[in-house]
Image (cartoon, grey):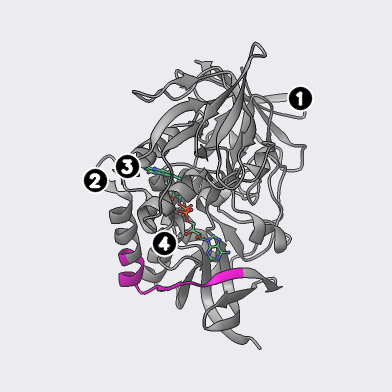
Amino acid sequence: MSHDRTVDVLIVGAGPAGLALAARLAGAGAGHVEVLEREQDAGGVPRHCHHGGFGGPVRPWLTGPAYARRAVRAAMVAGATVRTGVSATGWAGPLTLETTSPAGLERITARAVVLATGARERPRSARLVPGSRPAGVLTTGELQQAVHLYGQDIGRRAVVVGAEPVVRHAVRTLRRAGAEVVAVVTERPRGTAVPGVPLLTATTVGELRGRGRLSGVVVRHADGRTGILACDTVVFTGDWIPDHELARRGGIAVDRGTRGPAVDASFRTSVPGVFAVGNALHGVERAATAAAEGAAAAAPVLARLAGAPWPEAGPPLVVRAPLLWVTPNRLTDLTDLTALARRPLLLRSGEPLTAPVLTAAQDGRLLWRRRFPVRTAPSRSLRLAPGWTDRVDRSGGPVVLAIG
Ligand SMILES: Cc1cc2nc3c(=O)[nH]c(=O)nc-3n(C[C@H](O)[C@H](O)[C@H](O)COP(=O)(O)OP(=O)(O)OC[C@H]3O[C@@H](n4cnc5c(N)ncnc54)[C@H](O)[C@@H]3O)c2cc1C
């Protein structure tokens, strides 16, 4: 039997994005602001990132746990309720979430719901790596939790798979746990070099070997040669996917590029009253970016509480390869420069390009063209300031962003 309650704003996920939003809303007198967190402690991913590098350039750099503690404290001091060990599992109505916790089942109805569920690395199964199912196969997140939160034994010889900067965090955590890192393997032509670790580029992990415990990984090089790297641990890094299950269960439209909820510049999803913020929208960005999105969503959430209408979606914003995704990706209020000032477009290229030219076009009409004096990298997003979006025909076809 479930217990029914109502709150003003229900935020799912107590990471940097959800906590920053909760602090802003509670501080602005939004009523009962409740944050649900399925883990036993609030703070999100930074809780298990024991390196420095969290915060902003104008503030001292903090370790992940210190950053997480500060974010939790700010939300609670502002008056938000942060509940841990509570998972949102589904929807009992458009703005009613079903939750489960050791205290039992609940149905919580809110005037506004915000999804701040974060992102995760795709596990080995989703990467279609064949072979047996031995112990010792982890993502970086699982590795960090095992080492930093639970003090578990990891193994002695490890292979790290991936090309994104998170490779360095995986290597550091493995070394701290006493493991030797025998290689970093990536199928990309360039990878993340780590001193003291051989980097195998243009190389795929073809198979996992071992019964009970991992005994090695079969690697295949671009020229067709294969080899076996003996190891008892393999860590799959990067390749982020927004945690979108709750959004999908609620019938919320998911963007094909980001694979997170499709949102407009005011963080509004396709379901009236439901917002989404942080890495749930786009995979991993810096914690400060996720927190800034959470803080920026406070104004539209407050407007919703004050009775602001939920606008019809305008033309979609889509990308052409090698661009992977753009967010926001609904053009409801792209002509609203106030909303866009809160949040410029964020987009990601799948290929490294030097000083690329970016264009925006609609129905064959060029809306905008600009050269970016930077080198794009698959692990780094570009920020696109507004200023051209008032040229979008709101009754026209999709707006296509291309790069080259
Ligand atoms: C290995 C690693 C190293 C990093 N290093 C840095 C760094 O040095 N500097 C930096 O700025 N950033 C770093 N980041 C990025 C930073 O941690 C993230 O950008 C930030 O945590 C994103 O915040 P978020 O609130 O969007 O998501 P998260 O931090 O992922 O929080 C989402 C929360 O939602 C909860 N949740 C999800 N679904 C449910 C549900 N159904 N019910 C209840 N709770 C739910 C999750 O348990 C989680 O706690 C790193 C990330 C990783 C993985």
Task: Check contact, mark 3 vs mark 2: CB within 8 A.
Answer: no
Residue of label 4: 19
Provide the residue designation for mark 1.
Answer: 364
Does residue 181 appear left or right of residue 388 in this picture?
left
Q: Is residue 307 left or right of residue 80?
A: right
Bounds of the magenta span?
Answer: 73-88
Location of residue 281 in the rendering, given as x and y in whole percent from the top left corner = 57, 48
The reply to whether the magenta stretch includes residue 117 is no
- Residue flagged by tag 3: what amino acid is it? Arg
Mark toward the start of the polypeptide (1 vs 2):
2
In this figure, which residue is indicated by the disc labeled 3?
A: 176
**Label 1 beta carbon within 8 A of ligand 1:** no
Quarter of the figure with the C terminus:
top right
Q: Which tag, 1 or 4, sits closer to the chain's start? A: 4
Q: Residue 257 vs residue 202: left or right?
A: right
Which residue, given by chain and number where applicable, does mark 2 sit on?
59
- Between the C-alphas of marks 1 and 2, the distance is 45 Å
Q: Is residue 186 above or below residue 392?
A: above
Is residue 26 something one can see in this rendering? yes
Cα separation between marks 1 and 4: 42 Å
* C-alpha gap between disc 2 and disc 4: 18 Å
Comparing marks 1 and 3, which lies closer to the viewer?
Answer: 3
Tag 1 and tag 4, C-beta contact below 8 Å: no
Q: Earlier in the sequence, mark 2 or mark 4?
A: 4
